[in-house]
Image: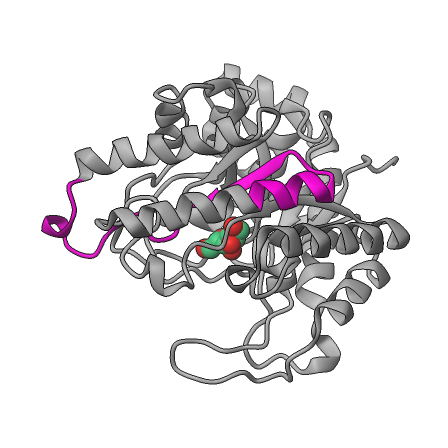
Amino acid sequence: MKLPSYRFCFGPWNISEGQDPYGPPTRPPQSFDWKLAQLKAHGFDAMMFHDDDAVPDIDSKPGAQIRKEAHALKKRLDNEGIAAEMVAPRLWFSPMTVDGAYTSNSKKCRQYAIDRSKRCLDIARILGTDLIVLWLAREGSYLRESKNARRCMDYLVEALDAMLAHDKRARLAIEPKPNEPMDHAYIPTIGHALAIAQLTAAPKRIGCLIESAHAILAGLDPADEIDFAMSFGKLWSLHLNDQNGLKFDQDKPFGSANLRVAFNQVRALERNGYGRNGEYICFDVHPFRPTKPEHWLAHLDNSRRTFLKLVQKVRTFNDAKANALIAARNYAALDQLVIDHLLGR
Ligand code: GLO
Ligand code: MG
């Protein structure tokens, strides 16, 4: 069977070193160059970037220097034949974003977040992508009374509008996540993302990115989120991974915790034609902490392998039989049809 021509990517942070809140790295730090070489050696097509993955120490550099370094990176990517899928402002590391970025209570901090986002837009333009990803990490609250959520919606719209005005061709893909690092995020689901887009000056240029684990953490089925977003033509990027229950964000390999949920995500992508407009399949996955350096990229290779195998499973699923069972309301048999198909008998 001919495999579909999906294109794949990941970010430098997906070759992580193993640190967690309870322990230090378990693998030695590696340079960006090494990570780029790995991406290429493993046959991926594009890289996702945070603004400071592209231009390190971005906050300490003037605009001209940032642009110069972005141009140099673009040259290197071109030489390697690697595309930049998107650029995302990393708005959760700076002392200015301790209590939120766009929704901080401090006007000065909100302005920092907007200015930094504009730099991110400039970098994306230079790297040849119009896609900006907004994971709204600290836009939420640890305690309900610490922020005015109503006012925060205005702040978010203000920030989105400032970005839309800064680059008239840019598209903003909101990546919702219901919690972590915040107790509660203000834009926890795709529905929230698409709704707030309507309050901005250019709703057409705001779409979304679904991450499997984030949907699961919101108590939702990622396949339904995909169908929902794609019925609006709004799924502009995707972070496939997996998640075992309502715990911390685990970023497991795609299909690792629940193969059937993964199968249904691929099914939703296939029936909606994801990728036809140039969208990439991105894996936002991390190595298990005990992983040895020699197996450092296995979680990425495995995620792609599982994805492609599931594409085959979707394409060989007996739809006629399934439809007959649906018509007969024989859901027990339908259930088993899926299980047998996934098990390969
Ligand atoms: C964390 C997010 C994070 C983003 C990345 C791009 O939970 O999934 O990995 O996807 O920073 O903005
Ligand atoms: Mg993600």
Residue 319 in the image: above or below residue 111: above
Q: Residue at x 41, y 58 (%)?
A: 92
- On the image, the x and y values in percent for residue 120 come to 56, 46
Instruction: Tell me if residue 135 is in the magenta stretch.
Output: yes
Q: What's the colour scheme?
A: one colour
Q: Is residue 341 visible?
A: no
User: With 5 as the anchor, is 237 left or right in this view?
Assistant: left
Q: Which residue reaches farthest left?
A: 145
For the record, the magenta segment spans: 120-148
Residue 258: x %, y % from top left: 52, 52
**Membership of 324 in magenta stretch:** no
User: Which residue occupies the foreground of this view, 163 or 48?
Assistant: 163
Q: Is residue 334 left or right of residue 9?
A: left
- Residue 291 location, x and y as percent? 62, 79
Tell me what residue is drawn at x 42 percent, y 28 percent: 161
Q: Name the residue: 72% across, 44% down.
A: 127
In the figure, 171 relative to 238: above or below? above
Residue depicted at 57% across the width and 61% down the height: 61
Residue 105 shows up from this direction: yes
Q: Nearer the viewer, residue 255 or 90?
A: 90
